[in-house]
Image (spheres, rainbow, N blue to C red):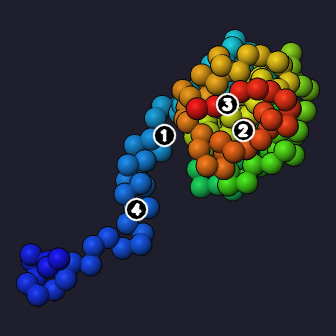
Amino acid sequence: MNDARHPGRRNRGAGPGSNFLVALALALPALAHEGPAPNRIDISAALTTSGQPTKAFLETLKSQGFEVVIYLAPPNVMDAIADEPKIVGRQGIVFVNIPMDFSKPTAADFAAFTRTMNAFEDRKVFVHCQMNFRASSMVFLHRVITLKEPPGPAWQAVQKAWVPDGVWKRYIVDMLQANRVDFEPL
């Protein structure tokens, strides 16, 4: 096909990175941090998940009644708040970082998360990551595997944040099967 702007020159079409760029352009609105805690989902009066909150939001956690913050991303990710442990600690809130690699979630990550959730089962807990993808998924697994909640309603909370695919869908299915939970996420 000829390039109309330059007769005789062939239009090379989309390069190998064009699909990625198109996908990125379509995803940018979803990746934008909206509000002080993006993708916030209040699971119960004692459990909330979200994406990376703003510094200003973190400073209000005590006034919201939170007693524990669990952060599921490595502390050096692009949008991490470097002094988050200090901001939270100054309020007397427990801060726990479980630095999950988004591209390689493991059974050990789930074990660490479950131990942490069990240790603070009588506290108001705020679980977050960058976009509430890790957080919503791990809370789903904890609710279904550990707390024995029905998977259907628990899955609805995940879907408010995202629809896991690829490595995360496989991880969730594998964790459910390993723990004999009969549920196939859509």
Instruction: Please give the count of numbered marks on the rendered protein.
Output: 4
Residue holding disc 1: 33
In this rendering, position of residue 180 left or right of residue 59: right
* Residue type highlighted by circle 4: Asn
Q: Which residue is mark 4?
A: 19
What quarter of the picture does the C terminus occupy?
Answer: top right
Would you name the residue on which mark 3 appears?
A: 184
Q: CA distance from mark 3 to mark 4?
A: 29 Å
Question: Tag 3 or tag 2, which sits nearer the N-term?
Answer: 2
N-terminal of the two: label 3 or label 4?
4
Residue at the farthest top position: 45
Q: Nearer the viewer, residue 67 or 117?
A: 117
User: Are dots 2 and 4 in contact, CB under 8 Å?
Assistant: no
Q: Position of residue 59 (x, y in %)?
A: 65, 30
- Label 2 – label 4 distance at C-alpha: 27 Å
- Specify the amino acid type for callout 3: Glu
Q: Residue, x 41% and y 72% (percent of image)?
A: 16
Say whether disc 1 or disc 2 marks the residue closer to the N-terminus. Answer: 1
Q: Which residue is mark 2?
A: 172
Q: Earlier in the sequence, mark 1 or mark 4?
A: 4
Label 2 packing within 10 angstroms: few (<14), some (14-19), many (20+): many
SS type, badge 2: helix
Q: Quote the CA–CA distance across marks 1 and 2.
A: 25 Å
* Label 3: which secondary element: loop
- C-alpha span from label 1 to label 4: 24 Å
Counting residues from the start of the chain, the first of labels 1 and 3 encountered is 1
- Disc 2 residue type? Ile
Q: Nearer the viewer, mark 2 or mark 3?
A: 3
Residue drawn 61% across the image and 36% down it: 132
Decide: marks 1, 3 in contact (CB < 8 A)? no
126 over 96 or under it: above or below: above
| Dot 2 or dot 4, earlier in sequence | 4
